[in-house]
Image (tube, rainbow, N blue to C red):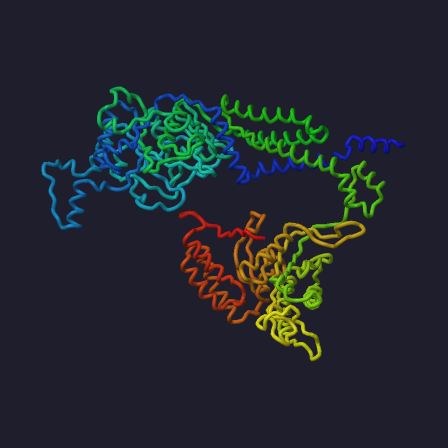
């Protein structure tokens, strides 16, 4: 044996048919790495939940005791009346907190409107509404306006007001022109390559602020709202927001700066965005947008709560609030200031601020370091390759222990990193790379090693010798049949209610009818360079674009559908006119009544009314000789084929007979045009067919360009207007347009029509909207039948 031959033999024995297994594992590892880069939504949600589980295992429940919550709780509201209170009572509460020695009192409450319980306001309202003059005897002038009383108290203490930034759009209510906001005094340290820090921060287009008289009474304020992650949980709190050319602090940050006497913060900006905010000597890590990853201490009431009623009635101990940073807020369910956090789905928002302050005071931070992303990606790909190598050359049983050690090491390493170093490192994609490779490669090896011989015998025994099959199995070689992927258009057609034909016709009559029908349809298909795949009873499966390349395959497929529908009308007219010739035997062999089969007619009424549904879809489809060497079929397969079949069957739900996908309309039609420019279509719906999550726009193919009748043009106008209203969830106006369109439908004698479908949908959605109020709707209709 030559040196080259020996090398091949050694290599073959080394691989032992395992190369495809390793390549599959490697490809899967690349896929997981790609998923890590892309961060798909469902995995992002899973990663967030994994982070919550890690935080629950590593968090420190002990607090400094400095942040305290004064709570407008149910007890307080029951004793002192529902919210909003008269401002003099709020002023009284603040004054007593100041007198109790609180270092700072921050209000997680917004006072955007004037107090309507002020005596001066009541006098005006009674004069305006009832023409009654009221005088308040013995009331000092200084107490006639509750807001001025409140402002007076605010100006005499260590108070920090809160306001609300609107991140979504223009705020409702008070405008922002007269807002007395307090921008953050800051110094900026820029690294090499850093841009202007404002561009990285969360921006707000508008603000809802306190009354100017209140805002000007204090020297510090901060915004009270937070942002949520994709699952609606508050994990990252913006410390800074960019608004109207200035930078403003979060209420937590403002309260802490006032409490510590720090008047200026130092922002460090890197090439990718913000890196930290320095307050005094404490460096607070933030992400590139200036958001703080909160290291929550636990669920609600982890911090001390004091009922506001105890402050007002004087039952609080004398020194209980001395030196404390007090946040005034509410836990009352009726006031709806609740947040979802990793520990609690209904944490009062005021306690979020307490957590932030406590984190900064103890310097107990969590953050994602700059190198975390590269490290996670490297570990993910490395774990995947290790799993692929191990599973390729070792059995699943022997691989369990080392792979289990890797999984445990990733989990406990992430916990140690979070608990001891404050680094948030996600092990999710490492788990996916190892677990996915284990499941995939174990299944693949089982299929190859346990089921391959049986598969080979059952599939190829009819045309291959047993010796060759055994040799292929031993050498791990699989015979390949021809096939290639190319963009073509798939065609499916089916006669509506064909089972009815079978009931009324004898077997010879059914064959006669089908032969005439299929001949006419196939002639049109072949004339347009289509390829017949197969007949399945009355159904025709075909495609355009293979084996010969047809650049305008989608346009030709549309022409086939339009011509077939026209041909069916001609056949129906022919069948309606056909009579039994004198001397011919009776064809109504099953004795159907005259209303179903008129005497002397060659065909029953159901044949006179024959209709065919057609579905078209374009996309990348595998075509070629598939099957065995003794019995092959030039056929097609792929997701695009499945969609075409679903469109054909789904057309009956709308009462249309040519249903095509948006992908057909996007195909080239020659001379720079696309199919959409060459046909007349009506937008029917955006659907997600059974078994598929991605929505697709579908259209009724009505005619070639310029061939619409005046009635069809009117139908298009009314239906499109109704569709626009429908997608905007204007149900009643949409229903009216669709009702008008009913008179112009193309096939009104069918079981239903698109206009009828949407009239019923509008009625249903008017009572049961597809999405909750305030949420946007994608307009997708998810089909429940194939």
Along the line of sight, the residue nearer the viewer: 707 or 695: 695
Q: Position of residue 610 (x, y in %)?
A: 61, 67
In the drawing, does residue 618 fall left or right of residue 728? right
| Residue 220 visible from this viewpoint | no
Where residue 37 appears, as percent x and y from the top left, is 57, 37
751 with respect to 487 (left or right): left
Dividing the image into 4 quarters, which one contains the N terminus? top right
Which residue lies most toward the right here?
1
Q: Relative to 400, is 694 on the left or the right?
A: left
Q: Tell me what residue is drawn at x 56 percent, y 24 percent.
A: 413
Which quadrant would residue 297 be assigned to in this image? top left
| Numbered marks: total | 0
Q: Is residue 41 left or right of residue 499?
A: left
Q: Residue furthest left?
A: 137
Q: Residue furthest front?
A: 591
Position above or below: 600 against 264: below
Q: Position of residue 604 (x, y in %)?
A: 62, 70
């Amino acid at each position: 044996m030559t040196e080259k031959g020996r090398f091949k033999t050694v290599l073959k024995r080394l691989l032992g048919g395992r190369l495809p297994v390793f390549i599959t594992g490697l490809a899967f590892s690349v896929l997981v790495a790609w998923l890590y880069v892309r961060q798909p939504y469902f995995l992002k949600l899973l990663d967030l939940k994994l982070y919550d589980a890690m935080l629950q295992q590593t968090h420190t429940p002990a607090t400094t005791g400095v942040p305290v919550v004064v709570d407008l709780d149910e007890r307080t509201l029951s004793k002192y009346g529902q919210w909003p209170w008269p401002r003099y009572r709020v002023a009284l509460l603040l004054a007593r907190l100041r007198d109790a020695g609180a270092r700072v009192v921050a209000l997680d409450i917004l006072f955007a409107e004037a107090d309507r319980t002020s005596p001066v306001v009541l006098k005006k309202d009674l004069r305006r509404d009832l023409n009654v003059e009221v005088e308040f005897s013995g009331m000092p002038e200084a107490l006639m306006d509750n807001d001025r009383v409140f402002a007076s108290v605010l100006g005499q203490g260590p108070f920090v007001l809160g306001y609300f930034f609107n991140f979504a759009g223009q705020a409702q209510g008070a405008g922002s022109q007269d807002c007395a906001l307090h921008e953050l005094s800051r110094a900026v340290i820029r690294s090499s390559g850093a841009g202007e820090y404002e561009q990285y921060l969360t921006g707000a287009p508008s603000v809802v602020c306190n009354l100017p008289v209140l805002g000007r009474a204090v020297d510090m304020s901060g915004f009270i709202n937070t942002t949520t992650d994709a699952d609606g949980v508050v994990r990252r709190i913006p410390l800074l927001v960019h608004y109207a050319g200035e930078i403003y602090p979060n209420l937590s940050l403002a309260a802490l700066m006032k409490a510590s006497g720090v008047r200026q913060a130092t922002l460090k900006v890197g090439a990718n965005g913000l890196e930290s905010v320095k307050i005094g000597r404490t460096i607070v890590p933030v992400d590139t947008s200036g958001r703080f990853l909160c290291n929550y201490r636990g669920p609600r009431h982890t911090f001390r709560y004091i009922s506001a009623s105890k402050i007002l009635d004087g039952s609080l101990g004398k020194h209980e609030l001395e030196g404390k940073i007090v946040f005034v807020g509410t836990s009352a369910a009726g006031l709806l200031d609740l947040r979802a956090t990793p520990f609690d789905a209904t944490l009062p928002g005021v306690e979020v601020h307490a957590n932030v302050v406590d984190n900064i005071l103890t310097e107990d931070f969590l953050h994602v370091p700059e190198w975390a992303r590269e490290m996670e990606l490297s570990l993910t790909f490395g774990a995947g390759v290790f799993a692929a190598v191990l599973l390729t050359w070792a059995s699943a049983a022997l691989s369990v222990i080392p792979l289990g050690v890797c999984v445990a090491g990733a989990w406990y390493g992430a916990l140690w990193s979070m608990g001891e170093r404050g680094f948030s490192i996600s092990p999710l994609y490492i788990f996916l790379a190892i677990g996915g490779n284990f499941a995939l490669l174990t299944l693949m090896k089982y299929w190859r090693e346990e089921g391959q011989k049986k598969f080979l015998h059952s599939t190829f025994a009819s045309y291959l010798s047993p010796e060759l099959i055994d040799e292929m199995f031993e050498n791990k070689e699989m015979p390949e049949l021809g096939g290639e992927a190319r963009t073509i258009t798939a065609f499916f057609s089916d006669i509506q209610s064909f089972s009815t034909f079978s009931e009324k016709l004898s077997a010879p009559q059914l064959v006669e009818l089908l032969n005439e029908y299929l001949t006419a349809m196939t002639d049109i298909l072949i004339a347009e360079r289509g390829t017949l795949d197969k007949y399945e009873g009355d159904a025709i499966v075909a495609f355009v674009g293979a084996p010969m390349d047809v650049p305008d395959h989608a346009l030709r497929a549309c022409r086939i559908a339009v011509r077939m529908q026209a041909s069916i009308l001609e056949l129906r007219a022919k069948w309606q006119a056909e009579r039994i010739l004198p001397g011919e035997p009776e064809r109504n062999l099953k004795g159907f009544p005259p209303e179903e089969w008129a005497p002397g007619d060659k065909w029953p009424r159901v044949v006179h009314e024959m209709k065919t549904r057609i579905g078209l879809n374009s996309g990348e489809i595998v075509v070629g000789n598939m099957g065995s060497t003794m019995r092959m079929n030039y056929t097609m397969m792929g997701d695009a084929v499945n969609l075409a079949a679903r469109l054909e069957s789904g057309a009956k739900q709308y009462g249309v007979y040519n249903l095509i996908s948006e992908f057909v309309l996007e195909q080239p039609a020659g001379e720079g045009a696309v199919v959409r420019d060459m046909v007349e279509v009506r937008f029917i719906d955006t659907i997600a067919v059974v078994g598929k999550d991605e929505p697709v726009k579908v259209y009724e193919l009505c005619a070639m360009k310029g061939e619409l009748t005046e009635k069809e043009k009117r139908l298009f106008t009314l239906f499109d207007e109704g569709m626009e209203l429908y997608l905007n969830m204007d149900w009643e106006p949409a229903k009216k347009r669709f009702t008008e369109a009913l008179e112009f439908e193309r096939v009104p004698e069918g079981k239903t029509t698109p206009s009828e479908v949407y009239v019923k949908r509008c009625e249903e959605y008017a009572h049961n909207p597809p999405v909750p109020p305030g949420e946007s709707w994608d307009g997708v209709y998810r089909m429940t039948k194939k």
